[in-house]
Image: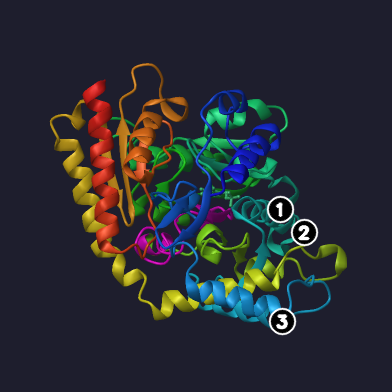
Amino acid sequence: MDPALRARVHAADRAHLWHPYTPMDEWRAGAPPPIVVAARGPRFQLDDGRWLLDGNSSWWVSALGHNHPRIVRALTEQAQRMCHVALAGITHPEAALLAEELAAVAPPGLDQVFFTDDGSTAIEAAVKMAVQYFVQAPASAKAGAKKRRFVSLDGAFHGETVGATSLGGVEVFRRPFAGVVFECVHVPSPASPSASCGPAWAEAFDAIADLVEREHDTIAGVVLEPIVQGVAGMRVYPPAYLRAVRDLCTKHDVLLILDEVFTGYGRLGPMWASQLAEIEPDVFCLAKGFTGGVLPMAATLATRKVQSAFDGGRARAFLYGHSFCGNPLGAAVAREVLAIYREEQVLAGIPERHARIAAAFAALARDPVASRIVRDVRAIGAIGAAELRDDASHGYVARVGWRVYEEALARGAYLRPLGDVVYVTPPLNIPLDELDRLLAIVQESVRAVAAGA
Ligand SMILES: Cc1ncc(COP(=O)(O)O)c(C=O)c1O
């Protein structure tokens, strides 16, 4: 990169750019950040010419790798035809056909597709949908007005809007907004933070069952990240819990809202995590891999039963809609993403990648040096995670993961941690030799930090 441009970018960033989840005083006082200038497949390129392996698919979004040529082509062709029209009183081919294609691949029954912008707004729409549903659903005429509360898990993460923050169960993210977020009951998570602690899933189920049985007349929905709580540190729980919660919700007329923003599009192996439990939710939220990391677009799917409560006149319609709802560029890209899953056997390649990820993380736990700081390792689908020991702090604010991050950066990988959890969520189609290199960097980096601890 031209040195004058590099200096200008650094100066502009320092002076004006407010980065997400970043203490800006530390950022400004720190070394000038790496500048990313290009991205392709499982790597992105820095201004000094180095190509880094993207260990987390850029916040779990680029599930098919960066700049997949088919997606870029679909975007360019659509841009030449039509970039945007509002889905207001009109329709267009990309939105209608994408809705049809999503309904065909979604868990059975979820054939009503409402388009949103990202994971947070997919959740926000689900929350509003659930509340308005109970106000209007004929069978719930009496209970409806009271059914306005939500239940989610300790450690849950569902996004950034006030509604999504209300559902969140990571204390550090909720604390600043106390008094503004709406009431949500957080129940114990069935996922153990490490192998040695946390309630067994049956005990966690007893807690949610007690609550729902007692208070179902005020509860609109249970919101869950199925099988893996990502932001909580890749915490995994068994499908049996999901099945039990499905039955509980059905019995008590509570909507089951599954947030597949992270787990969807094959991250756990099958297209949807809910397939591992063989259940069908009432409302289903998708984002991230939805556009293969190319544009912000998402969807909230519902059953026809849910949707039909919104029939009966303008005032009963779902009172929600973003300017970019069903944007033609996003829809064209999302259709191409589904075609790539169909035609490039993306899911078929996951077991081999899982085996390599699981073996590498298991080896880390056995390694005589690394194991000094490794508390637990876990792997599911194309996710591998190691929970590390940090004597000074714990969870999201721990620094040990950042020490691994620095080591990995020097070795050629971008490995942004979740506090004390170091993990990989590479593109699902990462070439096997590139995956092996990424996993070797994880091992070397954890070992380097352990050796210096
Ligand atoms: C499970 C889950 N839901 C929702 C979100 C919010 O998605 P977005 O960042 O696209 O708004 C995230 C983001 O990480 C997530 O992991």
Q: Which mark is residue 320?
A: 2
**Nearer the observer, disc 3 or disc 1?**
3
Q: Amino acid at mark 1?
A: Lys
Note whether ligand 1 is within 8 Å of mark 1.
no
Outermost residue on the top side: it is 392
Could you say which quadrant of the image residue 87 lies in?
bottom right
Residue under label 3: 81
Q: Which residue is mark 1?
A: 128
**Residue type of the residue flagged with mark 3:** Arg
> Which percent across, then down, holds residue 404?
34, 33
Q: Is residue 248 magenta?
A: yes
At x 22%, y 55%, the residue is: 356
Asked if the residue under mark 2 is in contact with the one under mark 1, i.e. CB atoms within 8 Å, the reply is yes
Q: CA distance from mark 3 to mark 2?
A: 27 Å
Mark 2, secondary structure of its residue = loop
In this picture, which residue range is highlighted in magenta?
Answer: 247-276
